[in-house]
Amino acid sequence: MKKRIVVMLIVLLSVSLSAFAGAQAEADKGYDLYIYNSKGENAAQFAEMAKAYEAETGVRVRTFSIGSGQDHMETLRAEMNSRNKPSIFSIQGVKELIEWYQGGFVVDFNSITDASFKALADNISPSLRLTYDGKSSFGVPYNVEGYGYIVDRQMIADLFGAASVDTFLADAKAATYAEWEALVKALDAYIKRNVQATVKLNGSAYKLATAKTGLAKNLNGVFAVMGAEKWTYGDHFINVAVNAVFANPNAAANATDADVEQLRGAFLAYAKALDLKTSYLAGLRGAATRGQDFVSSANFGYDQAVQIFADSKAVFFKQGNWAYGNIAGVHAAQAERLEFLPVKMPFESADIKVPGLTVAKLNSSIPVFVPNYYAINSQVPAAEQKLAMDFLVWLNTSATGKKYIVEEFNFIPYNADPATTILPNSLGNSILDYIKAGTIIAAPYHGAPATWSGDVVGLRLMEQYLTKPNWTAQDYKDIVDYAVQSWQNLN
């Protein structure tokens, strides 16, 4: 009996020690809350924000941010299958939500009873909510973003005269595609051969300067383009064309094959506009052309394109307000002089299927949308879910949290009032101007099949077209066919 008691005590002690050791291992993982961030552009600032949160609350936060311009889904899938899953993770729109919703990884905000978080979630504008079935809500917006052709006001002053900057930019926003194309070709002739042409924008005439002075002396091409970053022309550029048929991501997500067929005219306009943009390229060491060098990340990656534009070697740079910090890091003074111009395409009236939308409206607007959402992981313990809610409330309501959103991340808060908000960066304020004017379109490509725009269409363009110096009418047709058929095949 004594031996049996001793054995039982040993067993109980072993179990207790094992449980204690397990609890210690869990307690000693080094953090209380794990946040997965898919905005690589603000990785350093995001880590600093986590430290500020710990200083204010005592909650230890682990952050992970992907590299700038990197596809985050494979990394996130690995993290979701690990022992220490993120409590908060990023979802980039409806096409990614479907995977996490069907896998049971997202907390439905309608089921949450925490008063502070419920108030935050309920106040998200219905147009900005991340929904799957039209009823449930699954994400807190990171921010709202927009993109177009970034232009430096001082460059326009040096090209067309200081007195013409405001009128030039206003007329460029309203210009037709034909006027835009003529402007691009005139700038190319001026840069390469000093041809001093007069161009018309919105019916107004603008004459190029007699001599190249100031920033104009640095130019070697019209556009800074990231040939190695397929998401810029596969996702964002083609999104402009998708707007012609689908008004929002949910419309695209529910598209039938017949609906997708209606995109053919818009995709033809997309192919022609992409051909124009990639035919007049600036480079780090001189004018560039399409080819294998153009799709090399060593020469035309994200950082290289930022450098080309910040060095005033290009007039236009198709990017979003998220690039503000990158540009400021190269040329702080230039970053304060930036504005957006719309991405224009040679649409025909018959290409437009969205009620109330016109060619003129589409070509004078910029996409403004929620790029990322913070979702709460339903697979982590309830205590961690509560910490996640507390953090998201702090980030979006506290003075410190809002300071990081606006001043460090250079974000436009999703709940900002465009009539009263003034941001500390030029690109954010340019987007607010478009919002106030009502000249904005959406991001319906977020509702296309998950891999379609970047990994399928973008990859095909990179491998088969951006390496070719000249495109033909047959190339345009092949691009259209592939874009339509690949969407239908993935549906």
Image (cartoon, rainbow, N blue to C red):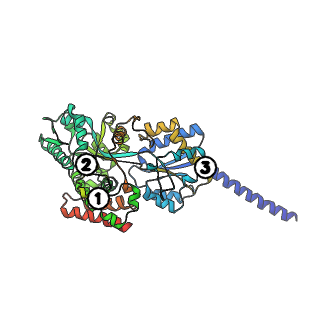
At mark 1, the secondary structure is helix
Q: Residue 350 versus residue 231: which sits nearer the camera?
A: 350
Q: Which one is earlier in the sequence, the residue at label 1 or at label 3?
A: 3
- Is there any visible trace of residue 314 in the rendered image? no
Q: Nearer the viewer, residue 339 or 440?
A: 440
Which residue reaches farthest bottom? 489
What is the number of the mark on residue 462?
A: 1
Amino acid of disc 2 = Ala
Q: Secondary structure at mark 3?
A: loop
Read off the residue under disc 2: 360
Q: Residue furthest top?
A: 163
- Tag count in the figure? 3
Mark 3 or mark 2, which has the lower sequence index? 3
The answer to whether 250 appears left or right of 21 in the picture is left
Task: Report x, y in % for residue 166.
Answer: 25, 35
Q: Amino acid at mark 3?
A: Thr
How far is the residue under mark 3 from the one under mark 2? Answer: 46 Å
The one nearer the camera, 174 or 188, is 174
Residue drawn at 44 percent across, 43 percent down: 414
Q: Identify the image quadrant of the N terminus.
A: bottom right
The reply to whether discs 1 and 2 touch (Cβ–Cβ < 8 Å) is no
